[in-house]
Structure formats: structure tokens, C-alpha cells
Image: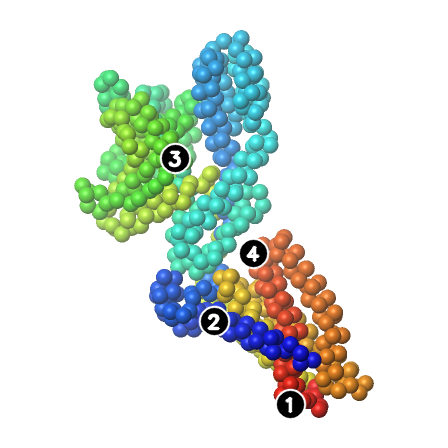
């Protein structure tokens, strides 16, 4: 029985020492670290001794507080954007093929492309070209020289699924840049994303950054076509909405008259509904903040109310933020308290932007961020170099402006969401609730563990104490493993630890009962211990294996709390089996080798 026990003893001692080493940062973080060190991982790592590392296990949302969100992705918008890109490619392709057309548009609020050919005879050529180079679309209907095209069902489904996957990736990037430790970001259903951000100190700020669409578009302003707004009777305008006009130098220096509206933000939908029937299908109404003084004077409204200004924009953007490679915050030296975000395009984007500005000198180009016009400057000359900027303006609260610029740069660098998102469920878990959960969970585990230890010591005496040592090492190994992988401990995870200890007790009870049986038939303590472990092994192995299989199934198909419970349980069961079969056996071997047992306390 003693053969080879030295190597097993060294293994157990080495694992115990390694576990203590792995757990030291977690002990320091939760027992000794200052609030500043807990909030800044760099400072926490700097506080660690030179011989120590700084990886620790983390507390989940339910234990340290934070934000629980379910965000919905507007996947239909992603399909429409995909259709827009196909329409752009189709325009270029038709020109290359020599197929004359008058218009290629995506009608508003649809995912179809309407192609109006110059000659009805070219319809067959168009269909042949589509079958050859645009296999993801098919012809929905044809009326004379007007052909309506739509995405295939498989392609549309792929775009919707990809939009959610890309949104998850983008949100994860933003969470990482916010410094959130171990966020939970997972797909839920067809178009929902579960987001859990533990330890967040400013939930509203986190939500605004995480959920910001950050879709950047440069769209040309149709200053000439705004004259159609003259047709709208003043009496039809919603309350507080006023019509205005001004002129500026257009292409060739000729004056262009622009008509626009100032509207309270509360009347935005009403204005859109009023104006939309008067504009072409390839135009849209853009909204942006109006200058405060002119807005208040024109509308005779309380200056504290938010006023929007309208623009008539081309629906198709000249270039989007997909080509961005960098975004940095700069301070405007000409305007105190003002900041702007300088953006850099990749080589392809730089060429597109240069051509766009060269073709539209003296015209206005709107910078549209998340569907809102940031500004609409006139293009004075061709802009090369592949850079542009978004100015955030000045204000008394300089720090807020700086934070806004930093947030904008962050979301632009992390990538735009492929489609708009909305918060469908939001819960905030306070630190007090999390602390109460930790205290309650720890108390339950301590009371339960104390009861188990007392039972084993009283019922199995000396052998019960050996089993208790195995249980304590089991818990040590489990927590060290969580720390090694930087895992997150949640309330269900604590339940998994409790169940692990219960399984460990079960294994030790089986071993002790088998040893008792062997002693009853007259075997020596040494032979009884050897036979007890040998005969209990199969039952212990089978019970742990079946439970591990169940935990793996939960891990595979569960999410959130269920998955956390399954992960902790799986790790705990592996160490429970090791502790019951190896650790306690080594202790028996050590005692027998040094004292030659004549009797056994069991």
C-alpha cells in the first residue's frame, strides 16, 4: 500500500502550494485592496509583490452589481443597407455593360431595388446580367421597362444573422474598451443580445456607449429640391414649426435657394409625416440641432426646449464610416471649450471621399451620425488626404464635451453597429444587493460546510477528519482553478461549489463505509483501507461521471446563470474525485507508513 505514496504526496503538496499561489491575488483583491486598486486593474497589478501574478477570479453581476441588458437589433435595417450597397454596385455594373437606365432606386421602407431602363428591349439583357453577376437577387416583377429586384430569402436570412453576430462582436469590443471585466455578451433568440456588465459604476454612460449605433454617413444636401416645401400651406404645419429660407452659392457660383423648417423635437415625427409625401423616393428628411438663438427667436418657444432643423438629403450616402481606420479627439484652438473628432479613411475610402468632394464643390455635404445631421458644411474645394472631422461645439461644461468626444471616438474605432439597436430589457443590480448576495451565499456555504465537517468528525471520527482535509483541499483547488482562468463566480456558481462539496462528502462516505465493512470481516486496517478504496472506486467514478455529463449538457445548451453553475460544477467534480481518491488515500498511506496502524478510528 505504501509503494509510490511519496510521489503522490509530492503531487498533492505541490498542487496545494500552487493553489495558494494562484489564490493570493484574489485574496488580496477582495480582502486588502483599496477602492482605487479595485477600480483600476493596472494599479492593482502594480500593488502585487514581484513574485506574484495579478490574475484573479471575478465576481459576477449578481455578486458585485452592474447592468443587465437585452438589446434588440433592427435586422430589417441591415437588409435595407445591404440592398443599398447592391443598388450602388448595380448602377456601376449597368454602366459598364452599356445598359441604359434612367433610375436605380430602393423605395423608402422596402428592401427592393427598382430599375427603370431607358429601353424596354434591354430587360432581357438586364436579367441575363443579374443571373451572371448578382446571384443573391432575383426579379420580383416587371412592368414594361421597370424591373423590381429583391434579395433571395437565403441571402436575406444570412444578412439578418450576420447583423446580430457583428453587433455582438462590436459590443464586445466596446465593452473591452470601457474596461468591463468579464462581460457576458451572447445571442438570445433571432435578433436579441444579452449583455451583462458587472462592476459598472455609471450604468447610463455604459448603456449610451454600448448601445450607440455609431453609423457614420456623408450625404449630399439637395438644396434645390427643397423648393417643393413651398407647396405646404403654413396652416398645415404642426404647432411651433416654422418655415425659413436662405440662399448660397451653388455649382458655378449661381445662387441656390434653400427652404428648411425649425421644429421642436417633440414634433419630429409629425414633420416627417407631413413632408415625406412631397419628396422623391430617393430623398429623406434629415434632422440636426438648430442654432439656439435663431431657433428660439423664430419659433417663439422657451429657449430651454430642444429645436431641430430639417435638411433634404439624398438617401444614398456618398461614403460611410465602414472605411474608417482611426478616430482621435482634438481640441479646437479657435473655439475655447470645443473639441472635435478627426477621422482617417483607409486608401479606398480616401479615394471615394476625394472624388465625392471634387464632384460636389460649392454644395453642402451633411455629416450624419446615428441618423442625426451633425453639420452640413459647404464644400469649398476637393478634400484629399483621406481625413475629415466631426465638431462637437463649445459649452460651459468642458469636461462633458471632452467625454462626449472620447465616447464618439471610442465607438467609431470599435466599429459601427451593423444596424440600429434598442434596449428591450434593462435591470440594474446595486452594489448593496450584490454584497448582500455574497454575504448570504458565504454564510450558507459556511454553515453547510461546518455541519458537514461536524458530521464527518463525529460519525467517522479520525477517518472523518481525513475526509474533511480532502474536502478543504477540494475547495482550495476549485477556487484556484477559477482564479487561474480568470473565471467569473456567480450565485449559481456558488451553488455549484456547494453541490461539489456534497458530492465530495458522498464519495468519502462510500469509502468509509466500505472500509468499515472490510474491518467487520476481520481484515487489518491496512488491508481494509486498500480494499475499501478499490471497491468504492467504481461507484465514485460512475456517480461523478454521470453528474459531469449532465453538467456538460447544461454548459452546452444553457446560458447565463445555468452555464455558470455548470462550469463551476464540472471543475468542482473533477477536483472532488481527485481529492476523494488520491488526497485522502495519501494521508492514510502517510499515517500508516509512520505509525503502522493496529486499529483504525472510523
* Residue 488 in view in this figure: no
Residue 560 badge? 4
**The N terminus: image quadrant:** bottom right
Q: Earlier in the sequence, mark 1 or mark 2?
A: 2
Q: Nearer the viewer, mark 3 or mark 2?
A: 2
Q: Earlier in the sequence, mark 3 or mark 2?
A: 2
- Give the residue drawn at x 35%, y 32%: 347
Residue 595 badge? 1
Mark 2 lies on a secondary structure that is: helix
Q: Earlier in the sequence, mark 3 or mark 1?
A: 3
Q: Position of residue 461 (x, y in %)?
A: 66, 87
- Give the residue drawn at x 51%, y 23%: 113
Q: Nearer the viewer, mark 1 or mark 2?
A: 1
Q: Nearer the viewer, mark 3 or mark 1?
A: 1
* Residue with the mark numbered 2: 21
- Give the residue drawn at x 65%, y 82%: 588
Q: Position of residue 171 (x, y in %)?
A: 45, 47
Mark 3 lies on a secondary structure that is: helix
What whole-number distance in Å separates the C-alpha atoms at marks 3 and 1?
77 Å
- Give the residue drawn at x 75%, y 78%: 531
Contact? badges 1 and 4 (CB < 8 Å): no
* Residue with the mark numbered 3: 323
Tell me: residue 121, above or below residue 10. Answer: above
What whole-number distance in Å separates the C-alpha atoms at marks 3 and 4?
35 Å
Q: Earlier in the sequence, mark 4 or mark 2?
A: 2
Q: Nearer the viewer, mark 3 or mark 4?
A: 3
Q: Earlier in the sequence, mark 1 or mark 4?
A: 4
Amino acid at each position: 500500500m505504501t509503494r509510490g505514496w511519496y510521489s503522490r504526496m509530492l503531487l498533492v503538496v505541490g498542487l496545494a502550494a500552487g493553489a495558494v499561489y494562484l489564490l493570493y491575488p484574489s485574496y488580496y483583491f477582495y480582502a486588502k485592496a483599496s477602492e482605487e486598486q479595485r477600480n483600476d486593474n493596472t494599479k492593482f497589478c502594480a500593488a502585487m509583490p514581484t513574485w506574484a501574478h495579478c490574475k484573479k477570479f471575478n465576481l459576477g453581476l449578481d455578486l458585485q452589481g452592474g447592468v443587465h441588458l437585452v438589446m434588440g437589433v433592427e435586422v430589417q435595417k441591415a437588409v435595407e443597407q445591404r440592398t443599398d450597397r447592391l443598388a450602388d454596385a448595380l448602377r456601376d455594373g449597368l454602366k459598364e455593360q452599356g445598359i441604359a437606365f434612367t433610375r436605380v432606386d430602393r423605395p423608402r421602407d422596402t428592401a427592393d431595388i427598382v430599375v427603370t431602363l431607358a429601353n424596354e428591349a434591354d430587360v432581357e439583357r438586364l436579367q441575363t446580367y443579374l443571373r451572371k453577376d448578382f446571384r443573391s437577387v432575383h426579379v420580383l416583377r416587371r412592368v414594361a421597362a421597370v424591373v423590381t429586384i429583391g434579395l433571395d430569402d437565403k441571402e436575406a436570412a444570412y444578412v439578418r444573422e450576420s447583423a446580430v453576430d457583428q453587433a455582438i462582436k462590436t459590443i464586445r469590443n466596446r465593452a473591452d474598451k470601457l474596461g468591463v471585466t468579464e462581460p457576458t455578451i451572447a445571442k438570445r433568440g433571432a435578433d436579441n443580445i444579452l449583455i451583462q456588465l458587472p462592476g459598472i459604476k455609471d450604468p447610463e454612460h455604459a448603456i449610451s456607449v454600448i448601445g450607440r449605433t455609431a453609423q457614420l454617413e456623408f450625404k449630399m444636401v439637395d438644396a434645390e429640391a427643397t423648393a417643393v416645401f413651398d407647396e405646404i400651406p403654413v396652416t398645415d404645419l404642426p404647432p411651433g414649426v416654422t418655415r425659413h429660407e436662405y440662399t448660397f452659392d451653388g455649382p458655378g457660383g449661381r445662387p441656390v435657394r434653400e427652404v428648411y423648417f425649425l421644429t421642436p423635437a417633440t414634433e419630429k415625427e409629425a414633420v416627417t409625416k407631413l413632408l415625406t409625401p412631397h419628396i422623391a423616393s430617393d430623398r429623406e428628411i434629415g434632422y440636426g440641432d438648430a442654432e439656439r438663438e435663431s431657433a428660439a427667436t423664430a419659433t417663439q418657444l422657451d429657449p430651454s426646449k430642444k429645436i431641430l432643423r430639417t435638411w433634404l438629403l439624398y438617401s444614398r450616402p456618398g461614403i460611410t464610416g465602414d472605411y474608417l481606420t482611426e478616430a482621435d479627439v482634438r481640441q479646437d484652438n479657435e473655439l475655447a471649450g470645443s473639441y472635435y473628432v478627426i477621422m482617417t479613411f483607409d486608401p479606398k475610402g480616401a479615394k471615394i471621399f476625394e472624388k465625392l468632394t471634387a464632384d460636389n464643390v460649392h454644395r453642402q455635404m451633411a455629416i450624419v451620425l446615428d441618423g442625426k445631421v451633425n453639420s452640413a458644411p459647404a464644400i469649398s474645394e476637393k478634400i484629399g488626404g483621406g481625413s475629415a472631422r466631426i465638431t462637437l461645439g463649445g459649452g460651459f461644461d468642458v469636461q462633458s464635451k471632452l467625454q462626449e468626444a472620447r465616447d464618439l471616438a471610442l465607438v467609431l474605432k470599435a466599429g459601427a453597429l451593423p444596424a440600429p439597436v434598442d434596449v428591450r430589457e434593462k435591470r440594474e443590480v446595486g452594489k448593496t444587493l450584490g454584497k448582500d448576495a455574497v454575504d448570504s451565499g458565504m454564510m450558507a456555504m459556511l454553515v453547510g460546510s461546518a455541519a458537514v465537517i461536524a458530521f464527518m468528525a463525529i460519525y467517522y471520527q479520525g477517518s472523518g477528519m481525513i475526509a474533511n482535509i480532502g474536502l478543504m483541499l477540494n475547495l482550495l483547488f476549485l477556487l484556484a482553478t477559477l482564479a487561474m482562468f480568470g473565471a467569473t463566480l456567480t450565485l449559481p456558481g456558488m451553488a455549484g461549489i456547494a453541490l461539489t462539496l456534497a458530492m465530495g462528502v458522498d464519495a468519502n462516505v462510500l469509502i468509509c463505509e466500505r472500509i468499515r465493512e472490510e474491518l467487520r470481516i476481520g481484515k487489518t486496517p491496512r488491508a481494509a483501507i486498500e480494499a475499501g478504496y478499490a471497491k468504492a472506486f467504481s461507484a465514485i467514478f460512475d456517480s461523478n461521471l454521470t453528474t459531469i455529463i449532465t453538467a456538460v449538457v447544461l454548459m452546452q445548451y444553457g446560458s447565463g446563470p445555468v452555464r455558470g453553475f455548470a462550469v463551476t460544477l464540472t471543475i468542482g467534480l473533477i477536483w472532488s474525485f481527485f481529492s476523494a481518491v488520491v488526497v485522502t488515500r495519501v494521508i492514510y498511506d502517510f499515517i500508516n507508513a509512520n505509525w503502522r496502524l493496529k486499529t483504525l478510528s472510523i
